[in-house]
Image (tube, coloured by chain):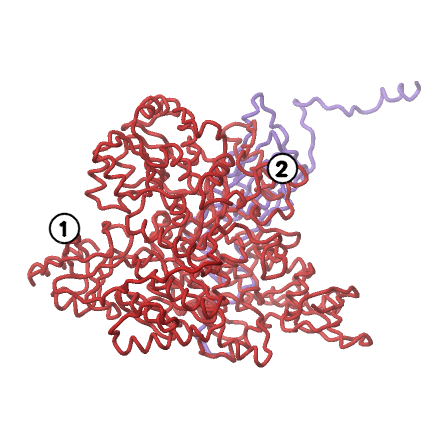
Chain colours: A red, B purple
Amino acid sequence: MATIIIDGKTYEIPTGKNLLETCLTLGFDLPYFCWHPALGSVGACRQCAVKVYKDENDTRGRLAMSCMEAVAPNQRISVSDPEARAFREQVIEWLMTNHPHDCAVCDEGGSCHLQDMTVMTGHDYRRFRFKKRTHQNQYLGPFINHEMNRCIQCYRCVRFYKDYAGGHDLDVYASKSNVYFGREEDGILESEFSGNLAEVCPTGVFTDKTLKEHYTRKWDLTMSPSICQHCSIGCNTIAGERYGTLRMIANRFHGKVNGYFLCDRGRFGYEFVNAATRIRQASAGEAVVSLDQLFHHLIPALKQAKMIGIGSPRASLQSNFALKALVGGDNFYHGVSDNEHDLAELAIRILREGSVRTPSTREVEQADAVLILGEDITNTAPILALAVRQAVRQQPGNAADAVNIPVWHDAARRELAQQDKGPLFVTSVHTTKLDEVARDVYHAAPDDIARLGFAIAHRLDPTVPDATDLPEAVALLADRIAQALSAAARPVIISGACCESGCVMKAAANVAWALQKKNPATGLVLTMLECNSLGLAMMGGHRLHAAFNAVMNGHADTVIVMENDLYRHGKADEVDAFLSKCRRVIVLDHLLHKTVSKANVIIPAGTFAESDGTLVNNEGRAQRFFQAYEPTDIIRESWRWLLTLGQQIENNRMATWRNFEDVTLAMDRDEPLLHGVMAASPPSQFRIAGQRIARETHRYSGRTSQQANINVSESKPPEDPDSPLSYTMEGFHGQPPSSLIPYFWAPGWNSVQSVNKYQSEVGGSLRDNDPGVRLLEPKTEGTHAYFVGVPERFRPLEDHLWVVSLHHIFGSEELSAHAPSIAQRIPQAYILLHPADAAALAVETGGVLAFTIDSRSYRLPVKLSEALPVGIAGMPYGIEGVPYADLPEWAIVQRTSQRQNLNDHSYAKRHA
Amino acid sequence: MWLTFLHMFRKRVTIQYPEEKAKLPPRWRGRIVLTRDPDMGERCVGCYLCAAACPVDCIALQATEDENGRRYPEFFRINFSRCIFCGFCEEACPTYAIQLIPDFEMAEYNRQNLVYEKKDLLIDSQGKYPGYNYYNIAGLAIGGKDKGQAENEEAPVDIRSLVP
């Protein structure tokens, strides 16, 4: 701590920060553009000038850019000094000389950092009489709109895109006041994090194109705190609604999970909520039925039925728990493939019984050595990949620390580090985007990756069984990795369920455990397949196959499938047989899919935006998401449907449950692994000064007019029995507890930069700590045994291919694939082969490979890749046109004759 | 008493409305209209500022865009049963689209009829501000006006040029 005097007042402040951060933390409104808490300082915009005085006798002082000035003890500065203010106003005036007269038609308007800063400095009248420079725009793909005239040359976009997120295709062109930020030519932005440009850009150059389709100003949205549903990281988001449709997803800062950024799947995948394929009506048989008819039809039947329930890894804890309570614990099945089921249980075992803690994403950023075993995290948990990209800067950063370059001094640190990268080792089946920043890359079969893992663990702790007869290159690699991990201060091992190999996860656990004996700061991150995979596994339940057997053997005749497309988790013929054997198939879901089409009764469930719920992320953190708006028609949350059904069929356990809180409380009490989940959010009775927290801003418009076309008398606004939030602009508008922040706003700060005001220290955690509770903590005492059973070396078989899943950020996840913007980025179905295999099988790129897995036949167009190990084939996971297969599995390849191959070629063309 | 007597010979203030209409000043704040620009394009760009300024929140709209990037309101609704004719919407409007005109004869027997949609609001006139066309000043390219063609704009920068 140090003392600093600002405008004559003395403050106690932490050292190691720059003046800008310090002033903002202390609550001063100091304008800035190029500085960003995650990107650091470069001193490019000259906006944050303050007066710095040499000593107490200095009366003149000097102007200094506060973002480039480290705080010094007993320093005297002035923010409100007239000269500094005039300087800041003048800088804005210069920046505005070329800024177009666009605010009325600019999507950023109302949440624009440039607007805020212009007002803050007091510049209000244009004196510049000359012409404005203009720029042509570019097409940047389905996510981001480009309007280059509005640029103020702060360089934040390229600093984020290139330096922070590792993108290659956005750059700066031309010179002086003509500088142009864009691509070399029109085209889709390649980075998975391009959506953040909309939030990073302080003005309207890069804006959210999906929001533009149904544009609404920030102040007109009904917003609520939500959790991303599209991967297992559980990034915090803000969901904004207007006129009954979801309009946008914005980042909700979380100091531990997602920080300032989201991936494109999370930001743009929301449009499935508004999809035309939404289920909005209940139906029984073929007919659409009303609520009364539905219950009339369903209740007598359910009272007699032998019910089983199939839950879902993409449904909330409450929904799964309500289903479990409705059908009884013995009749509750996880709607995931057996392999996925095993992997999720293995993950819990590793995280609970092991001694190594799962670091949060923010802690991964701080890691100085990272080993990724088997996962392509750019596609399965993108924000984790972004964190790893920051982690590789940690070790080169030591050199900067040695010469006293502070952490925030971004330009200098990058200059010093040049291309130097910290130890990152990527092992995967196929190339990943992180390969380019990795020190060593190893592409091999999952079993070989596991063997490498065992070998590393053995080198760290000789009691771990070693993988014998490793090839020399691999043994040397294991030596290098073991050495780098032991030398690191905060090593992190990353693996997960997405590579679908238990051995790899076990190997990762062994490495982490062995390393932890040397270094207690070791972390182990396991990614999961879906947003609540871990939560579902923590609830306990049977395998999907057991559900099939229960019906096939006549133990049950009615199945309730909740928010799950069984065809994504089971083989088509088995699911077909199962569903046709059931007397009654009741499906609760929000989107049409194949399982829905086979249902006798369809019940419309709410999506995340229309529901309250809790998800458990890969770290074991339970996080609450809140309903953004009351659904239309008869759509309700799954758990509410199940609660109503339970009460109608006189389920004793559910008789007293009335709302969200009751379900959560019962779950907290009855599920041992989920104990503590109640603490994920304040209770629904929570009030601040007797008020609910308003979902709408105080500027919300159209209250007395938006429904006036239906009825001029305004109806009563909906009430929320499940949360302390209100659906109106009436309520508390200050800073609520961190888990209840519906939007970021502070006086004078309308843009997302207002998040500074919500943090206890700029760039740090939210006030009163970051939301969510960690339910999984490692064992602190006692020992645990290492996993044994080193897998055999992978040997290719003739006429066989070992088929593994390849994940895609766009397409592999079920819900986001329904968003029109994401759909444009989904790859075509394919099977990836090594050229040697393709040559042996006489197929080429674009040709069709016919093969059978588990005596089911598949035909997919061929793609080739040198990076894939020989004998292995990659099949995209969850993409339309790729039928489900229980992977990884051996495929038997039917050799095609040259002639048939030619025919296939034309087939592929036809279907391209 | 004397004063009262004198008043009997003064000119009458009361006019025989509705046979005789009151003369309203041009800045009278009456019925709200949406005007058009000199090219007869809709002036409203759907910026939502009128709705935000409205103290009784009686304006609701949804912005949309034509194929050339020109913004216009998909629907524009004013609930005149709530409107207090304060004129804040007109003050807030950056494009002179929304204007209050000297007409107050809007009475209805049925309150629902006081909900005006865009078709009721949009007039074929420039209203009080003839000659103003927002897109001639804004930097956005729309159909018929490319980048650099607005008032006070240079031609677009050739980013591949090295000429200083």
Label 1 sits on residue: A855
- Residue A894: give x, y in percent of width and height: 10, 58
Amino acid, disc 2: Ile
Residue B101, label in figure: 2
Q: Is residue A39 above or below residue B25?
A: below
- Residue A774: give x, y in percent of width and height: 50, 52
Q: Which element type, helix, strand or loop, lies under badge 1? A: loop
- Residue A347: give x, y in percent of width and height: 38, 55
Closer to the camera in the image, A852 or B13: A852
Q: Is residue A477 above or below residue B127?
A: below
Residue A368, label in figure: none
Does residue A242 appear in this view?
A: no
Closer to the camera in the image, B164 or A71: A71
Q: Residue at x 16, y 58 (%)?
A: A848
Amino acid, disc 1: Ser
| Circle 1/circle 2 CB separation < 8 Å | no
- Residue A333: give x, y in percent of width and height: 32, 40
Figure quadrant of the N terminus of chain A: bottom right
Q: Which element type, helix, strand or loop, lies under badge 2? A: loop
Q: Residues within 10 Å of mark 2 (few under 14, many from 20)?
A: some
Q: Where is residue A184, by image quadrant? A: bottom left
Figure quadrant of the C terminus of chain A: bottom left
Q: CA distance from mark 1 to mark 2?
A: 78 Å
Q: Is residue A66 above or below residue A678?
A: below
Q: Label 2: chain?
A: B
Closer to the camera in the image, B1 or A310: A310
Q: Label 1: chain?
A: A
Q: Residues within 10 Å of mark 1 (few under 14, many from 20)?
A: few
Closer to the camera in the image, A452 or A107: A452
Q: Residue at x 33, y 26 (%)?
A: A302
